[in-house]
Image (tube, grey):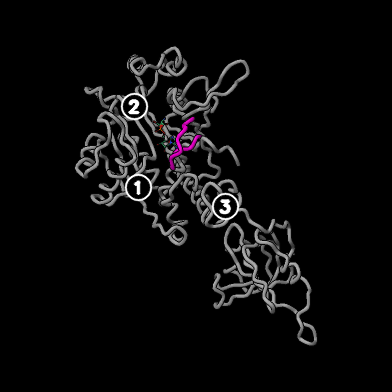
Amino acid sequence: MNARVLIKNLAALDDGLVSVSGWVETVRDQKKVQFVVLRDESGAVQLVNPRSTDAEGVVVDDEPATTISGLSQGSFVTVTGQLKHDERVKLGGIEIKLESLDVVTHAIPETPIAADSSLDKRMDWRFLDLRQPKSNLIFRIQTTFEHALRTYWIEHDFIELHTPKLMASASESRAELFEVEYFDTKAYLAQSPQFFKQMAQSSGFGKIFEVGPAFRADPSFTSRHATEFTSVDSEISWIDSHEDVMQLHEDLLVAAFTAVKAKHGEEVLALFGVEVTVPTTPFPRIPLAEAKEIVKSRGYEVPRDDDDMDPEGERQIAAYVAETYGHEFVFLTDYASSIRPFYHMRHEGDASLTNSYDLIFNGTEISTGAQREHRIDVLTEQAIEKGVDPAEIAGYLDFFRYGVPSHGGFGMGLARVLMLMLHQASIREVTYLFRGPTRLEP
Ligand code: AMO
């Protein structure tokens, strides 16, 4: 038997006998000839089966014609046949004239979802929804994106970590914390690898990264929040300020966007109508207070003066940056201490501001980064000021008592980046299996 060929590789082959496997997308069962469009993970191809006739010219029911007549959409099959290049064939200029067709599994003919089904319905049947070429492309892009980040980290001597997701205390804040039974006690699901990526600095690891799950008991139903998401984290020692973290962050994104554009740029344009743009460095940097003024001058006032940028403010500042600098990214820097966690280092000489940033991409936050406070006395004071009981985070505070270098890092939501890169309306579209307040299945 011929070895299986991926459909995308057929075009490069000479005419001759081939074997392909995949699922049935459409069947056109005509009187004199049958057409099947077969799809696999790499593309689609037309199969053609001219019906046989008897001596009087009457069509006879032979194989594989009978099987094709009963073939339901979605069934998985293996076929062999003669590959033929023919410019007249719309689908890729090739077709396969069938010699045999084996049905591996029959699909129930009535598919539960259609192209116009609601997002929620599609998510109920995610395994079928993912058969769409667009979904398949999203996860190939994600693979390339992560691979490019990892290549950058490895080439720059970073160490990969897998920090535990079962924790004895909160890792970000007491809000949005999942509590789980843990034998005779309680454990919490990690909201971020924050504490343990900082621990690696105290351990003398220098530069680290982690790509792993993070959990937030966030009851909201926005398009950009999930209760479980993949967090892309990195942390580096010996920095002078958050500027060093921002430089690392933009270099990583340039590497990842370059790889995605090179490998998938044409397909993204064809399927999503989106041009992948490799960002130029340095990305624009705007202190938060100034960004709020800019947004105000555009006619939108961010509610409450001491608060974070809200989603509309993020969209407005992104529009300003796009118009002024032609850039899709902007670092908003120097957030007020009042809205940042206790572990962010504050400005020397102005404790009201932090050495921190948020990264906005196409109008939505994708990341938070900061220089960390590494001086144990200042860190403890800041914790107390924020209402964090030092006794509760005693293990974390110990990391700073036995020597630790200056350091900083960032956390970035993987799905947010993909959603904004591909101009998708929700992270549900770019998450393999979304988890939200009312979704635990499939
Ligand atoms: P922060 O809480 O801002 O910072 O989270 C970092 C990034 O993670 C993503 N994110 C989410 N994505 C989907 N659903 C959610 N519920 C969700 N929450 C957060 C966002 C966000 O920008 N420890 C710090 C990072 C650091 O300083 O290193 C932290 O977790 O893209």
Badge nearest the viewer, 2 or 3? 3
> What residue sits right under mark 2 in the picture?
340
Amino acid at pointer 2: Arg
SS at circle 2 = loop
Image disc number at residue 362: 1
- Residue situated in front as seen by the camera: 149 or 58: 58
Q: Over which residues does the magenta segment extend?
A: 217-227
**Mark with earlier residue (2, 3):** 3
Badge nearest the viewer, 3 or 1? 3
Quadrant hosting residue 19: bottom right
SS at circle 1 = loop
Residue 253 spot, x, y in % from top left: 39, 45
**Mark with earlier residue (3, 1):** 3
**Mark with earlier residue (2, 1):** 2
| Residue in the picture at 27% in, 36% down | 302
Q: CA distance from mark 2 to mark 1?
A: 23 Å
Residue 113 spot, x, y in % from top left: 59, 54
Relative to 255, say whether 336 is above or below: above
> What residue sits right under mark 3 in the picture?
129
Q: Residues within 10 Å of mark 3 (few under 14, many from 20)?
A: many
Amino acid at pointer 3: Asp
Q: Where does ligand 1 appear, by image quarter?
A: top left
Q: Is mark 3 within 8 Å of ligand 1?
A: no
